[in-house]
Image: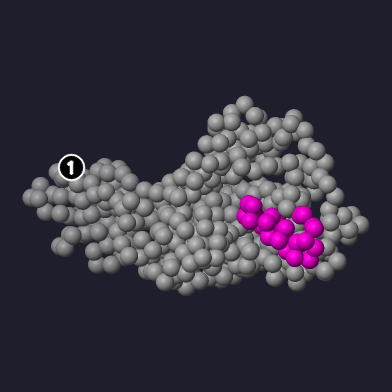
Amino acid sequence: MILVACVFLFLAIAKGFEPLLLVPIAFGMLLVNIYPTIMDNPTTTYTNAEGNTVATVDYEGEGLDLLCAMNANEIVPVSDNETQLVDASGVVVATITSAEGYTAGDLAYLLASGSYTMTSNAGGLLHYFYILDEWSILPSLIFMGVGAMTDFAPLIANPVSFLMGAAAQLGIYVAYFLAMACGFNGMAAAAISIIGGADGPTSIFLASKLHQNELLGPIAVAAYSYMALVPLIQPPIMKAFTSDKEKKIKMGQLRPVSKLERILFPIVITIVVCMILPSTAPLVGMLMLGNLFRESGVVRQLQETASNALMYIVVILLGTSVGATTSAEAFLKTDTLIIVVCGLVAFMFGTFGGVMLGKLLCKLTGGKINPLIGSAGVSAVPMAARVSQKVGSEYDPTNFLLMHAMGPNVAGVIGTAVAAGTFMAIFGV
């Protein structure tokens, strides 16, 4: 894993592959494989009246709260001295490491007696960064920053872009059924499939909401890696499924978008999407709040903070903590390989879906839409839109597709959040 981290650093620094993402991710990966305790959970040590250590427990609550947890959840032995408390959903609530000569039952008796001493042990630095991922705080703040930086005018001016953004979510549903076929349960498959949206924050958000914390690391690393590798993955698919004539199509100038439209758009989208799928409010709400900062013109300081200082602070925290989930023992598993493969398949089918709908719209509009912009429907903003521009300019240097591609690109952000909300609604989260 140290070698993998060094390769990622090389790609980011020497080749310029999305360094803002890959540098913190790769360095977090490097740190955790050199010094694993940097990701240790905080623990509490329980000592009896004689001063003997009975157990060390990884659990957010203490004392009687822990005793209630032991009574309410299934006690699952892991090894001779380690026991886990597992709830009805299969989520590990606590891990109990018993001292030599003691058992989890001895700890329960000790807690009931009230004659014990607790000693709190701090966790590793990156563990506290990672908690912000699990609580969905960092993904939501990333969305606010993206909204504050993004101009939704191309989407407002060309609403058909919504269709291409929706079509590019094809990969999510293909990956869902593929993950199910590979033996993952429904919630795990849903968490894995969202990688197909090429949206790291949404992948982290959904994995946390569906209680797939054990898979969160591989899912997040796969999602962010594919976001960074958009310039490598997408062009072959785009070129294979479009003709030279289609690649050279020049699209007309987008109509001007009024200030009123710009202000109303985030408000209307928030109301409509969050009323239909309330569970998307943390992501869609923050995305649209950031955009309202930008478009209202009356909170310039908030817009600048959300899109610059705050955004980059969050990227550092999120990137290093995501990278730090990739310790060798946690990452080098068969499930991780399956997740990476499913994510790649999802991303490829997402690109394919967007391009194919672009071809259909090209036919229906008499050649007014360049199918290449459909690939930008995956929500890697603005990398996917840049790729559409780059591939188009290879065939005609005077063809400027970037602003047209931004329409499907920002529609894809909304589409991926909606897909995540749909899964949460299906599983009753």
| The one of 99 and 144 positioned closer to us in this rendering | 144
> Residue lying furthest front in this view?
397
Quarter holding the N terminus is bottom left
| Residue 324: x %, y % from top left | 40, 59
Examine the rendered structure and indicate whether residue 162 appears above or below residue 247. Answer: above
Is 390 contained in the magenta span? Answer: yes
Q: Quarter of the image holding residue 97?
A: bottom left
Number of disc labels: 1
Can see residue 179? no
Please tell me whether mark 1 sits on a helix, a strand or a loop.
loop
Q: Residue at x 27, y 62 (%)?
A: 82
* Image position of 259 (left or right of 382): right
| The one of 304 and 57 positioned closer to us in this rendering | 304
| Residue 407: x %, y % from top left | 73, 48
| The one of 1 and 105 positioned closer to us in this rendering | 1
> Residue lying furthest left in this view?
50
Q: What stretch is highlighted in magenta?
A: 375-401
Q: Which colour scheme is used?
A: one colour
Q: Give the amino acid at mark 1.
A: Gly
| Residue 71: x %, y % from top left | 31, 49
Q: Which residue is drawn at 55% across and 32% down?
A: 302
Say which residue label 1 marks. Answer: 114
